[in-house]
Amino acid sequence: METVKKQYLNGETLGPHLERKRKESGLSLEELSEKTRIRKHYLQKIETGEFHKLPCLPYNRGFVRTYATYLGIDADTAVKQFNAEIGLEDF
């Protein structure tokens, strides 16, 4: 049986939501990387939903929190969505 994951970001998954907001802000990945001090490679993996290619859970949550905060997105909501997408929605 497939589990239905909660959507906290208006029905969007985290990566595409963050990517859309970044582009609406007129920021390139390079600029965002410089401003947030998160490697461009990690930002790309967040945007494509390849969370398994990120370092480890505490860092990943921190990256999502920092990315969201910089774009003016509620960081707690973004982290809840991240948790839901990786299967830890009750964490």
Image (cartoon, grey):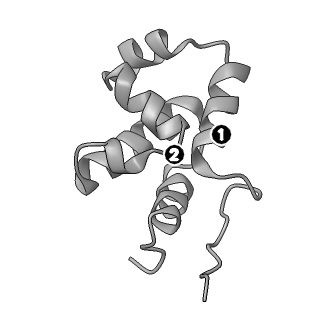
Residue pictured at 66% horizontal, 41% vertical: 17
Position of residue 34 measured from the top left corner of the image (x, y, whole percent) = 37, 12
- Left or right: 52 with respect to 73? left
Location of mark 1 (residue): 16
Q: Name the amino acid, label 1.
A: Pro
Position of residue 22 measured from the top left corner of the image (x, y, whole percent) = 62, 25
Q: Quick one: label 1 or label 2, which is nearer the N terminus?
A: 1
Q: Name the amino acid, label 2.
A: Gly
Position of residue 82 measured from the top left corner of the image (x, y, whole percent) = 48, 57
Location of mark 2 (residue): 49
Which quadrant does the C terminus fall into? Answer: bottom left
* Vertical order, 4 against 66 (above or below): below
Q: Contact (CB < 8 A) between labels 1 and 2?
A: yes
Which residue, as the protein is rendered here, is positioned at the far front?
1
Q: Which mark is residue 86?
A: none
Residue pictured at 32% horizontal, 22% vertical: 39
Q: Residues within 10 Å of mark 2 (few under 14, many from 20)?
A: some
Which quadrant does the N terminus fall into? Answer: bottom right
